[in-house]
Image (spheres, helix red, strand yellow):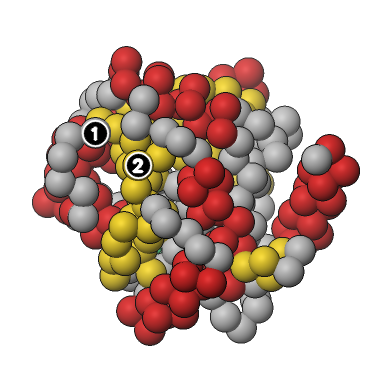
Amino acid sequence: MNYSVVIPAAGQGKRMKAGQNKQFLQLSSIPLIIHTLLVFEKDPWCREIILVTNQEEKEVMKNLVHDFNLQKVNDYVMGGSERQYSVANGLDAIKDETIVLIHDGARPFIEQAKIHELVLCANETGAAVIAVPVKDTIKKVTESKVETTMERSSLWAVQTPQAFRLSLIKKAHELAKQQSFLGTDDASLVENMNEVVAIVEGDYLNMKLTTPEDLLFAEAILASRKGKE
Ligand code: CTP
Ligand code: MG
């Protein structure tokens, strides 16, 4: 079952404190964004990759894609000031109705079998996201005081990829724009239309590299995978 994927990589990586966009940080001597792109390059179901980049980083990205001989990057789209706007620009580059995945450039460990499970689910339901049960107890806090303890059994940490019918997610982005609604992920824009979003249980290893210590975890994951090859 074929799909297109939009990969937002047009952030600043401020929380990583690396002095550059974290997409270019080396993990086992390969840039983070290349690890992510390779997952989709290798997936036979992936028909095309739309890469969303900062305008001033477009040439560097193009050179990397060329150096690593990636064939599926079909379009380079300019990022926006918020992730949501970057994704919206990416979606505009896809014309024909399809299942579209949206996947953070900073999340390199998603596995092909999980992508396929997600795509099949989105094809049935229209919208599906990868998520894992929350392990910690989560409390709602106001001014350093606990307001309430959330019921953990109903809490899930949502990751990417998130998969949608293209027409549905485009409509959701358009409505959000009209309403000036800024969601923290793409599924929340679909929820904002009162449409159902299905959950596909994912894997704790599908981490997003956000803060400096995440680099340690990422190197450890790569080392453990290398041992299995
Ligand atoms: N992203 C994007 N456009 C933006 C903001 C983020 O394309 N305006 C991308 C990032 O490049 C990343 C993904 O969305 O691949 C998830 O965002 P996040 O982890 O928050 O990355 P950054 O925004 O780069 O990091 P930070 O928030 O720490 O600055
Ligand atoms: Mg960010």
Lower sequence index among marks 2 and 1: 2
When the figure is inspected, residue 196 is found, relative to residue 17, above or below; the finding is above
Residue 194, by quadrant, is top left
Q: Please, which residue is most extreme toward the left here? A: 178
CB of mark 2 within 8 Å of CB of mark 1? yes
Mark 2 is surrounded, within 10 Å at the Cα level, by few (under 14), some (14 to 19) or many (20 or more) other residues, namely some
**Side of 46 where 213 appears, left or right:** right
63 and 35: which is toward the camera: 63
Across and down, in percent, residue 185 comes to: 40, 45
Amino acid carrying mark 1 in the image: Thr
Q: Residue at x 24, y 59 (%)?
A: 89
Labelled disc at residue 47: 2
What type is the residue that disc 2 sits on? Arg
Q: Nearer the viewer, residue 189 or 29?
A: 29
Relative depth, front residue between 67 and 110: 67
Q: Position of residue 177 (x, y in %)?
A: 17, 53
Residue tagged 1 = 98
The mark found on residue 74 in the picture is none
Picture residue at 39% right of the left edge, 53% below the top: 72
> Is ligand 1 closer than 8 angstroms to the Cβ of mark 2?
no
Q: Secondary structure at mark 1?
A: loop
